[in-house]
Image (cartoon, helix red, strand yellow):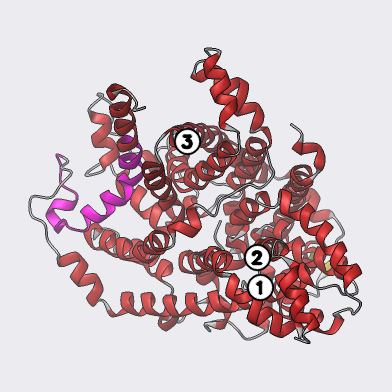
Amino acid sequence: MTMSPQLTTHGATQRIVLESGEPERKGRRRREKVKVARHLMDNRTAYLMIAPMVILLGIFVFWPLVYSFYLSTFEISFYTDPEFVGLQFYRYVLEDPKFWHAIWIGAQYAIYVVPIMLVIAFLIASFIRTVGIKLAGLLKTTVYIPTVVSAVVASIIFVFMYRSDGGIVNWLLSFVGLGPYAFLSNPDLALPAISVPGIWLAFGITTLIMLAGMYDIPESYYEAAQLEGANYFQRTFYITIPLMKNVLLYLLVTATIGALQQFELPLIMTGGGPTNATMTPNLFIFNTFKDPTPYATSFSLTAALILFFVLGTVSVLIFKLINSDKAIDG
Amino acid sequence: MREPLGRRIAKWVLATLIVVSTMLPLAWMIIAGFKGKNEVLRTPFQFFPDVWIWENYIQILGDAAFMQAMIITFIGAVLFTALSLTVNSFAAYAFARLDFRGKSLWWAYCITPMFVPGMAILLTSFVVVSNLGMLNTLAVLIIPGAASAAQMFFIRQFYLNTPVAIEEAALIDGASRWKIFWTIFLPQSQGPFVVVGVGSFLAFWNAYVWPILTIQDPQLQQIMQYLANFRSDRGNEWGLLMAGSALAALPTILLVLIFQRYIVNGVRLAGMK
């Protein structure tokens, strides 16, 4: 999801969190040692060094967040003073069928994207693990390239690829006797069609994270299994998957949270249509922002906050689980 | 011991398949850029053009608005990267190596934004920046996103693992914390700085939603804004649009290729199984 650059890093965030397990604990231990060795505190220097970050986050994250909460409890109108309405908007949002429709679209999108992407990434990562170092390097760079392509460029490419005249997808389908389809104007096909660039943009980094997890599994496990005559599937299901339980769980959750928040692809490719078939939750919220009726502002803010409660809670729980000692022994 | 020939061939076939299917959309974009008006939408379909023409690429490079968008976005991305590296590495150093009052409280404060989805603060961020008079300035694109919890976290992990011995020796010699940061930590920070720096650059270059909310001035139009507008205004000039998209994606792909050593190998999971 790309909004302000701040918000864009959210996806990357999760990846970085992952890399933190061990050093975090080591660091803590070491820091305690430093504390004993050194007698002066560094209050002044430390405050100066964190000040820019603290101030920027205060103005551009915390203040807008508090302001969102404030606005979600007021009814704003151009003609009268804002009126305190408590949690009324939360009830409106939760009773609005359009909100639930958007949630349903988001869930469907996640169902299309997440399992396929995880399986593709797992298969490619398993393959890269078996090839030589040079080919592995080439493949790793190749699968990573789509990750850096912007959602706008991806949308433009795929809109072009999906055209019914001159589009490459329909041309490829014609070899198996299908089509032509007007993918983006057919309500049944539009959401699956949008999922393809969604997968294409995200599978590369997922592959690299899985691969990093696979490289951590000692080669001797596989050698022993091979001596015992275990085939690829047995090695995958009895060694790779159980030992990568945490990585897979982590990827599953972050990919799902990411998918539920997707909105640039539908925004550019279909604008939420046809007949709201690609109206994901964030696109619904974004469109309501721009609705000039008085309720709309508070309504969409409230919807955004409800999603924030749910997704934020899940992220925090997963972050805790992954970084807790309990998760490590698996 | 060499692998049997059949297996080696199978591996190369599979590898080629992965490369081709991953690169197909990008290759298709670049090739479509080489097609003339009457070829780009031709039926029956043809993958390669009969005549390869440079016209689309030359024409889009000659488009003043396109070049302006490329240049202004590039300048913004460089400034944004520099600012965010400064802000985040300072905080990272303080949290990794210094003890100070209220540290855990400030840590919680600085790390919380990782869990705030952008949509929850998008509209009110817009209200804040317009109250600050920042709309239609380069600053509105650069400053609000510069402080990043994720990037600070990443750099901090690296500083936590730097050995203490040199630092303590320098302290005994009477060096200040600032001097230690500049002379010991910064020179070693190449790896993590490349990873988060490239991340910042990409985030800025690829940004779309925040620019369309805050920038109306055509002089400051961002490259992704330009492309999306091009698509809705001149949507039938596909060859030109593909050429423009290819050129707009080029800097990001070049960055990955140049820094692949750091980025692709930078994904490591320490201690997680």
Tell me if residue B32 is in the magenta stretch. yes
Q: Locate residue B266: give its quadrant.
A: bottom right
The reply to whether discs 1 and 2 touch (Cβ–Cβ < 8 Å) is yes
The residue lying furthest to the top in this view is A229
Eye-nearest disc, 3 or 1: 3
Does A201 sit left or right of B128 as displayed?
left
Does B71 sit left or right of A50 as displayed?
left
Give the Cα distance between marks 3 and 1.
Answer: 34 Å
Instruction: Pinpoint residue A100: horizontal percent, then vertical percent.
Output: 67, 41
Q: Residue at x 38, y 79 (%)?
A: B71
Name the residue carrying label 3: A129
Q: Residue at x 42, y 59 (%)?
A: B256
Q: Locate residue B167: give its quadrant.
A: bottom right
Tell me if residue A324 is in the magenta stretch. no
Specify start and end residues of the magenta stretch as a single range.
B17-44
Task: Specify the amino acid type for callout 1.
Answer: Ser
Q: Between residues A231 and B67, which one lies in front from this camera angle?
A: A231
Task: Specify the amino acid type for callout 3.
Answer: Arg
Does B169 sit left or right of B236 as displayed?
right
Instruction: Pinpoint residue B173: horizontal percent, then vertical percent.
Output: 77, 85
Give the Cα distance between marks 1 and 2.
Answer: 6 Å
Q: Classify the position of the C terminus of chain A by image quarter.
A: top right
Q: As displayed, is residue A261 above or below residue B133?
A: above
Q: Locate residue A135: give its quadrant.
A: top left
Q: Residues within 10 Å of mark 3 (few under 14, many from 20)?
A: some
Name the residue carrying label 2: B155
Q: Is residue B273 visible?
A: yes
* Residue at disc 1, secondary structure: helix
